[in-house]
Amino acid sequence: MLLKNNSDDKSGEEMRLEQRVAVVTGGASGMGKATVLRFLQEGAQVVIADFNSETGESTLAEFAALGFSDSLRLVKTDVASESDVEAMMSCATDNFGKLDIVFNNAGVGGAIGPLTETTVEAWEYTMDVLAKGVFLGIKHAARIMRAQGHGGAIINTASIAGLSGDAGPLVYSAAKAAVISLTKSSAVELARDKIRVNAICPGFIATPLADGGRPEQTRSAFAKTQPWPEFGSGDHIAGAAMFLASDDSIFVTGEHIVVDGGLTAAGPELSKRFPKSSARDSRVSGVTKGTTGEAPIIQRLDG
């Protein structure tokens, strides 16, 4: 990630998000963190909403040291809690006076393992964070944006896992497919209010959520897995989010933009590319909780 204040470099260039206010969920890590920085560099005021207080405070301090303290706020948020989502929206309006952009990005890996061993609890946890969290983000962003009367941009993190089979864990894939459908339906309903709703479908992006504490191995594996010869990073997603947040995409709504280095063009075939992690042959089952700070719940399967 590019960790510098680029505002000085833009002295002769208009910042595309100047006087805009944004909320980014999952904003303290990975794709969300990269997007927060990009939005700040483009002149926005940003609320970081994240479940992990430790990484939240660390990110707040890091970006404040770059000169962004007046443009930045942090609120601990469980995106599956409606009261928390309402509070994060209020953080934006109370501190910065309005709301222009919401990036519903928070995510977890969620349920893993064979379908026949997946518990209802693992299903519900995954769906709560990945699908219900996006629904709540759209709902409460739309209420504020509609009342303001000047439109806005809502961006949702989906995934290539929601576009086809064998592109991700089963429950995760189902949740991301729901996000894509929800994006399209919401875009139609909110169009007359000039509220644009779009989704980003990342491929294999090397982030703390994806690398399992082995960033170098992950980057190398991801780069070899897709047609494009370099691994995907949070900055690549931040670039797509920047386009969808800005007036450059003023006539774009109801779309899902794939950012995957050509992986879906080639065909994901996850079970062939990563046979050891194939759900069918997995010897573990449970639920992972990403960068939330909470421990995964994993059990080994006998046989």
Image: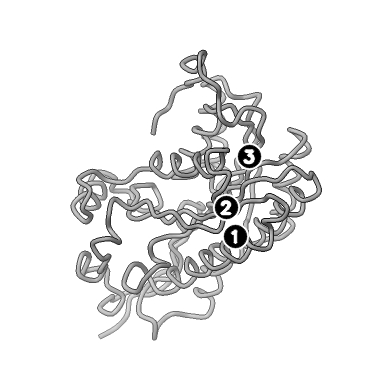
- Label 1 belongs to which residue? 134
Give the alpha-carbon distance from disc 3 to disc 2, as whole Å.
Answer: 11 Å
- Asked whether the residues under the numbered discs 2 and 1 touch, taking CB atoms below 8 Å apart as contact, a structural biologist would say yes
Marked residue nearer the N-terminal end (3 or 2)? 3
Between residue 62 and residue 38, name the one nearer to us.
38
Q: Which quadrant: the C terminus?
A: bottom left
Q: Which residue type carries mark 2? A: Asn
Residue 64 position by quadrant: top right
> x, y percentage for residue 108?
47, 59
- Label 3 belongs to which residue? 22
Between residue 289 and residue 226, name the one nearer to us.
226
Residue 287 position by quadrant: bottom left
How many numbered marks appear?
A: 3
Q: Residue at x 53, y 37 (%)?
A: 36
> x, y percentage for residue 261?
29, 50
Marked residue nearer the N-terminal end (2 or 1)? 2
Give the alpha-carbon distance from disc 3 to disc 1, as whole Å.
Answer: 15 Å
Give the alpha-carbon distance from disc 2 to disc 1, as whole Å.
Answer: 6 Å
- Label 2 belongs to which residue? 104
Above or below residue 19? Residue 128 is: below
Q: Residue at x 27, y 72 (%)?
A: 278
Q: Secondary structure at mark 1?
A: helix
Q: Which residue type carries mark 3? A: Ala
Q: Secondary structure at mark 3?
A: strand
> x, y percentage for residue 48?
60, 40
